[in-house]
């Protein structure tokens, strides 16, 4: 079964509020077996435009990635992020080849 990934790019507009979200999302990520692959490290844009922060989370399966996003635990954390960051987030099935 292929792994699942969240790929997010964001521009943080309120660092204090975003930090509350970051602390709160740990509950959902632990429950669904998420592992950070990329978490806001240094990045270099080579083509196009890209926001200042990137995050990639790996889940045991794409089903777990979807379930985490839809979970009450994550939705509570996500509510803390409202107004703190502009976010694009996709869920992607990993390559099983």
Image (cartoon, rainbow, N blue to C red):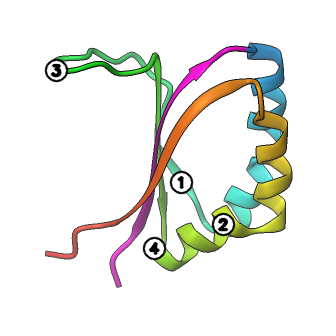
- Residue 95: x and y in percent read 22, 68
Q: Are marks 4 and 2 in contact (CB under 8 Å)?
A: no
Reply yes or no: does residue 75 show up in magenta. Answer: no
Picture coordinates of residue 56, whole percent (x, y): 45, 44
Which range is magenta? 1-13
Tell me the residue at 74%/24% (across/down). 84
Q: Nearer the viewer, mark 2 or mark 3?
A: 3
Residue appearing at x 54%, y 67% in the figure: 65
Q: Nearer the viewer, residue 10 or 31?
A: 10
Residue placed under numbered mark 2 in the picture: 68
Q: Earlier in the sequence, mark 2 or mark 1?
A: 1
Of callouts 2 and 3, the N-terminal one = 3
Residue holding disc 4: 62
Residue 24 position, x and y percent, is 83, 43
The residue where tag 1 is placed is 35
Residue on which disc 3 sits: 47
Cα–Cα span, label 3 and label 4: 28 Å
């Amino acid at each position: 079964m292929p792994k699942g990934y969240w790929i997010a790019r964001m521009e943080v507009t309120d660092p204090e509020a975003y930090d509350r979200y970051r602390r709160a999302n740990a509950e959902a990520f632990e429950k669904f077996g998420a592992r950070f692959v990329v978490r806001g490290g240094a990045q270099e844009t080579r083509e196009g435009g890209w926001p200042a922060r990137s995050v990639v989370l790996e889940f045991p399966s794409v089903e777990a990635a979807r379930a985490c996003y839809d979970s009450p635990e994550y939705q509570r954390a996500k509510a803390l992020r409202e107004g703190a960051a502009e976010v694009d987030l996709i869920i992607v099935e990993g390559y099983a080849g």
